[in-house]
Amino acid sequence: MIHNFNAGPSHLPAEVLEEARQAIVNFNGSGLSILEIGHRTPLFSEVVAEARQLICDLMQLDNDHEVLFLHGGATTQFMQIPMNLLDADETMHIVHTGVWSKKAIREAQCFGKVNILASSENNNFNYIPVDFCVPEAGKYFHITSNNTIYGTQWHKIPDAPIPLVADMSSDILSRKLDFNAFELIYAGVQKNIGVAGASLVVVNKKILGNVSRDIPPIMDYREHIKAESMLNTPPVFAIYMSLLTLRWLKNAGGIDAIEPVNKEKAALLYDVIDNSSIFKGTARREDRSTMNVTFTAKSREIEQAFLKYAAEKGIYGIKGHRTVGGFRASLYNAVSPDSVKYLISVIKEFESGHNG
Ligand code: PMP
């Protein structure tokens, strides 16, 4: 058996894969594959409608918040958000916490002014800055709620007197938050929601229609809202997989039930790393992510040896990002406590062979 800790695309629940397998051959007894049905048929519009409703239910969204499944992953949102929200003479504020916020900065600069309020670049993004204040003069404030590469996470969402925008690609639906406090939330769906090919956007419709530029209709959130997420042919399979994963989460008790499991998984793994003589965590303790656990080994040789050992033991996807090195175990919702315990046993076994 393989235990998948990949950062994204990521592990999916076995029952989700099984149901998808059926649907690829014969979707809901229609005699057609989910991959070949018309996207404007009731067969598929019911999929989109249920997936959007499940997001509303799981996140307890109010009536102002609209749910969209769009093309282009989170990266397209780096561009689409400022195009919809930021005029050329307006400023957005951002806290720079890594590669993904850098991309958000770069794209927003194409549309308006960007003010970096704080940054953790001085320490290779191993912490979340706290020393800043969000000014009232600004169009919106952007954070990356979980920094997939560095294993850092905002445990307290900062107060902001202006609309709050968050890239939640790697911790969406993993913990309870007041999601209505955000004017816009976006995420690539390939980690906690489904498979690559779509992005989720949750937007408070009250903030739209407030820029002077002519937004191309395909990039205009208002057009997507009007078309109920079916402005053009949507990423059918990615939305279907999202639906199955969202149903799985709901049946498992939703965010209320998964959050303590996620905390427990992360605590177990951090505990082993903290007590290890050869491994060491890379993120500042109080900012550690429950989703991506990053750590390094004492030497390059040990690092290589552990990667090989772990692969032989059926551990997949724990090589760290090249900018951090070492290892990264991603513990998204679908990764079971048993898989985490297995990884821990492999770490301990390896360590006992490398002591002294
Ligand atoms: N933001 C974060 C926090 C991410 O982890 C990623 C992908 N790993 C992205 C944005 C980019 O997402 P995509 O590949 O879906 O464009």
Image (spheres, helix red, strand yellow):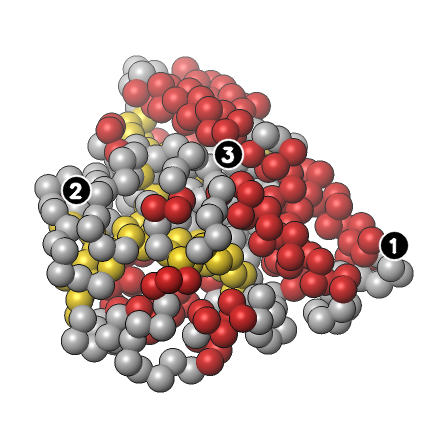
Which amino acid does the dot numbered 1 rest on?
Gly
Which amino acid does the dot numbered 3 rest on?
Ile
> Relative to residue 156, is residue 44 depicted above or below?
below
Q: Position of residue 94 (x, y in %)?
A: 21, 56
Which amino acid does the dot numbered 2 rest on?
Pro
Tag 1 residue: 29
Distance Cα–Cα, label 1 vs label 2: 52 Å
Tag 3 residue: 255
Tag 2 residue: 129
Q: Quadrant of residue 235?
A: bottom right
Q: Residues within 10 Å of mark 3 (few under 14, many from 20)?
A: many
| Sequence-first disc among 2 and 3 | 2
Q: Where does the C terminus fall, quadrant-wise?
A: top left
In the drawing, what numbered circle is on residue 260? none
User: Depth check: 19 or 7 in front?
Assistant: 19
Kindly state the secondary structure of the residue where label 3 is placed: helix
